[in-house]
Image (spheres, rainbow, N blue to C red):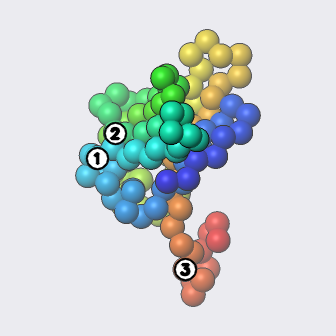
């Protein structure tokens, strides 16, 4: 799992195996250690609601993805799932969950 943070944008790039795990209803977790006492946990998980949601609490970045959006995305050429989170923010938070698959250069693939 790769995470890019930029101004009001969380962008996750997931490997094929990570996309498959989400498709199976499993959560993805990654822990980044800064020292023995400091770390940040990153979680991407399916949930029942129909909106994507991101949160940051207790050194944990968590993104919930609608289960209904995962299956069509995981089993197609669709690159990503995208949403905006407003929740009283002046500028909404963009959330992008994208496939980070190797390009097939033998074909004229978009985005490679």
- 27 horizontally vs 4: left or right: left
Does label 2 or label 1 sit earlier along the sequence?
1
Q: Residue at x 59, y 20 (%)?
A: 86
Q: In terms of image quadrants, where is residue 107?
A: bottom right
Helix, strand or loop for disc 3 = loop
Residue that label 3 marks: 104
- Which numbered disc, 2 or 3, marks the residue closer to the eye? 2
Q: Residue furthest top?
A: 88
- The front one of 3 and 67 is 3
Residue that label 1 marks: 26
Can residue 73 be seen from the camera position used here? yes
Residue 89 position (above or below residue 100):
above
| Coordinates of residue 99 in the picture (x, y in percent) | 50, 58
Q: Residues within 10 Å of mark 3 (few under 14, many from 20)?
A: few
Helix, strand or loop for disc 2 = strand
- 62 horizontally vs 93: left or right: left
Residue that label 2 marks: 46
Give the Cα distance between marks 2 and 3: 28 Å
Does label 3 or label 1 sit earlier along the sequence?
1
Give the Cα distance between marks 3 and 1: 27 Å
- Which numbered disc, 2 or 1, marks the residue closer to the eye? 1
Q: Are marks 2 and 1 in contact (CB under 8 Å)?
A: yes
Q: Residues within 10 Å of mark 1 (few under 14, many from 20)?
A: some
Location of the C terminus (image quadrant)? bottom right
- The front one of 73 and 102 is 102
Q: Residue furthest right?
A: 7
């Amino acid at each position: 799992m790769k995470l890019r943070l930029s101004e009001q944008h969380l962008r996750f790039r997931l490997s094929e195996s990570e996309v498959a795990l989400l498709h199976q209803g499993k959560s993805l977790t990654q822990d980044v250690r800064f020292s023995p006492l400091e770390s940040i946990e990153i979680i991407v998980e399916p949930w029942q609601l129909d909106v994507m949601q991101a949160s940051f609490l207790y050194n944990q970045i968590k993104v919930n993805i609608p289960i209904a959006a995962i299956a069509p995305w995981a089993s197609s050429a669709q690159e990503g799932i995208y949403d905006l989170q407003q929740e009283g923010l002046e500028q909404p938070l963009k959330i992008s969950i994208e496939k980070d698959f190797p390009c097939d250069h033998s074909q004229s693939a978009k985005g490679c």
